[in-house]
Structures are given as C-alpha cells and as structure tokens.
Amino acid sequence: MSRFVVEHAHSEQTCPAKDARLAAGLLQIVAPPNASQHGVTIRAEAVTNGLHHLYLIVDAANAETVRSYLAPFAQVGSLSITPASRCEEVVHRGAC
C-alpha cells in the first residue's frame, strides 16, 4: 500500500455542505467502510474552516485507485492526489 495526501478545493458558491442531499452523499463517500470497499483506507481527514479545502491522508494501491474513488469530489471542485510517506520512512531513507 502507498500513502497519499489528497486535497479537494471548491468555491463558496459550489460548497457541497450547502446542499443537504449532496453533502450527505459526499459524507458517505469518506465513510471508512465505503472507502475500504474501494481499496482505500482513510488515515485522517480535515476541512479548513471557511476556506473550502478538504484534506485526506489515505493508503491505497496507487493514485488511480484514489482518483477513481474520489471522482465525485472533482465534480464540484479540484482534486489533487500527491504521493506521501510517513515520517519514519523519510528518516529511514534519509530524504523527503
């Protein structure tokens, strides 16, 4: 499994939290049991207050698995998936 940092951003106008039905659907997507069914493990999640950015730390086989799983977020804004490592791994290999 590989680790990824995911960033989703949207505008205030397209904020899915404003639409109860859309918000419930997106919340269901990031539910751990649903993620697991798609081969993704969510390690952490956070939304920056008032800035309309969602951050996820996930483990998956590859970036395409993550992109496919989170495709609905790309419909309301941007979706960035960046390979990442745990601190221990970075120290062990001696480089970020």
Image (tube, grey):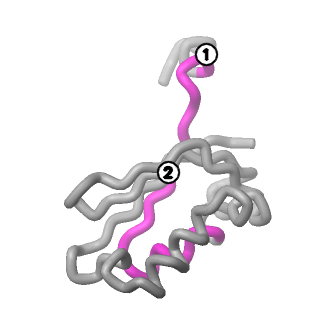
Magenta stretch containing residue 79, yes or no?
yes
Q: Nearer the viewer, residue 49 or 60?
A: 49
Magenta stretch containing residue 3, yes or no?
no
Q: x and y percent of residue 59 in the render?
A: 66, 46
The extreme front residue here reads 20
Amino acid on which disc 1 is placed = Arg
Image-quadrant location for residue 40: bottom right
Q: Nearer the viewer, residue 6 or 35?
A: 35
Which residue is found at the position 53% from the left and 44% from the top? Answer: 44
Image-quadrant location for residue 71: bottom right
Residue located beneath label 2 in the image: 56
Q: Is residue 89 left or right of residue 7?
A: right
Vertical placement of residue 13 versus 54, above or below: below
Which residue is found at the position 53% from the left and 21% from the top? Answer: 87
Q: Nearer the viewer, residue 20 or 79?
A: 20
Q: x and y percent of residue 65 in the render?
A: 69, 63
Q: x and y percent of residue 8 in the render?
A: 40, 63
SS for callout 1: helix
Count of numbered labels shown in the rendering: 2
Which residue is found at the position 50% from the left and 55% from the top? Answer: 81
Q: Which residues are magenta?
A: 69-89
Residue 93 is tagged as 1
* Of marks 2 and 1, the one in the foreground: 2
Q: Are marks 2 and 1 in contact (CB under 8 Å)?
A: no
